[in-house]
Amino acid sequence: MSVVIKDLSAHIGESVALEGWVETTRSHGKVAFLILRDGTGVVQGVVLKKAVDDATWEAHGSLTQESTARVVGRVKQDDRAPGGFEVEVESLEVMALAEEYPIQPKEHGVDFLLDHRHLWLRSSQQRAGLKVRSEVQQAIHDFFYRRDFTRIDTPILTGSIGEHAGTLFETDYFGDPAYMAQTGQLYVEAACPAFRNVYCFGPTFRAEKSKTRRHLTEFWMVEPEVAFADSEDNMRLQEEFVSYLVERALENCAEELKVLERDTSKIDHVKPPFPRLSYTDAVARLTERGHDVTWGDDLGASDEAVLTEDYDLPLFIYNYPKEAKAFYMKENPDDPRTVLCDDLLAPEGYGEIIGGSQREDDLERLRERIREEKLPEEAYAWYLDLRRYGSFPHSGFGLGVERTVAWITGRHHIRELIPFPRLMNRLYP
Ligand code: NSS
């Protein structure tokens, strides 16, 4: 039976079989080497001509980059070897010879790499980034499970626009328009009176026409919704949640963060409380620094970058002007020009990773906001029902997984933190 590379430490001195893909080979006369990757790790195999039969020696000679092979050999501890082990090959069998592999150990342009994303996934930094993503996703579920949240799967095909009309993917639903979900929020709100605290976690879609380092057209978002929580409670939950995700990545992905050359001193102190700045104070600070921003505008990426410069923790900007935000946010009783909401901005220029708010729970005010935004009222009849039958204060937020993992791993562009990125100009592979 074959073993996997990450378990080799339990087999020192034993002869084991390994199956995997060949990254490189080299040969010096009567001794040859191969680097084998099996998805759990990478190990060097050493082939001595005198110790193997001709078939194995020839098989090694025929190996090309990314060929699949089955190797039988004795496990030896070797601190100089990558991973700390070496395998003295006894026999080697080629399972599939690979054609000339397009990705070579040299610099390739990013368009070339994205065209070959199905192969690029195998590269060490891509593997490391996606491992951290997987850990963060597991941590998301663990966090909410431990706090007794119920997971609600929300629809991807929807009739009601979740955020705003600008970035919709529309499709034909038996003659009627349907939209790919921009958010699951309206549906988790409906699930609160059934389960109290809930969350959804899935892909969301926005026809973003921007080609920036932080926009995808399909991205994953986790959205908790909490009954009887106000905006303050909401921010407290966000800072605890984000701190937990960072902690889990540091705890379980040390190797991956090393491969990514992440300076972990930039994130190892991420703990509540996070600093808070009101939108109005943020605009004043930006104006002081010479930014051309008017009260009422949403904040752009360059504004966010300036605001976060002063902090080494994520920064809350709270209570934005009504017109800059979505229709469902609750009016601020202390300043009705604003709504009870927050954006959480990650440091080091990563910018917004969370958008959250207390929800408008007043039926008439919500109806008015739907009209002001010129959204089709009929499509929200069911949503308005939630304010008719037992309205309640509630709050929630959405955290973008790719942006969060890009910040944790220190990668520049979020497209590397999703296995198959969907971008404005990219639907393949
Ligand atoms: O539009 S958000 O700010 N908020 C919502 O969708 C709310 N419905 C969430 C809620 O309260 N339940 O998006 C939330 C986050 C945002 O902070 C980003 O981290 C991420 O979703 N996001 C994106 N990530 C990647 N690409 C794109 N285009 C994108 N848009 C938002």
Image (cartoon, rainbow, N blue to C red):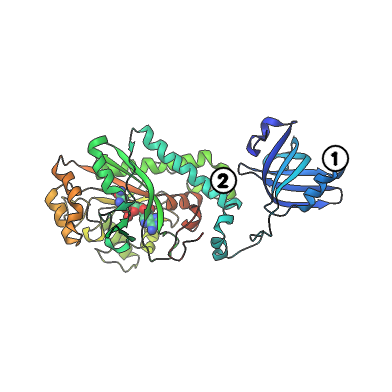
Left or right of 139? Residue 386 is left
**Can you say which quadrant of the picture contains the N terminus?**
top right
- At x 38%, y 32%, the residue is 146
Left or right of 374? Residue 200 is right
The kind of secondary structure element at disc 1 is: helix
- Using the numbered discs, state the Cα–Cα distance from disc 2 to disc 1 in whole angstroms: 35 Å
- In the image, residue 154 lies at what x, y percent? 32, 46
- At x 44%, y 39%, the residue is 139
Between discs 2 and 1, the one toward the N terminus: 1
Question: Which kind of residue does numbered mark 2 sit on?
Answer: Glu
Crowding at dot 2, Cα within 10 Å, few <14 / some 14-19 / many 20+, comes out as many
Is residue 166 visible in the rendered image? The answer is yes
Q: Mark 1 highlights which residue? A: 51
Q: Is residue 142 above or below residue 61?
A: above
- In the image, residue 412 lies at what x, y percent? 49, 58
Question: Which kind of residue does numbered mark 1 sit on?
Answer: Ala
* Of 383 and 98, the residue lying toward us: 98
Crowding at dot 1, Cα within 10 Å, few <14 / some 14-19 / many 20+, comes out as some
Left or right of 27? Residue 160 is left
- Look at discs 2 and 1 and give the one toward the viewer: 1
Is residue 345 visible in the rendered image? The answer is no
The kind of secondary structure element at disc 2 is: helix
- Residue at the far front: name it: 174
Question: Mark number for residue 256?
Answer: 2
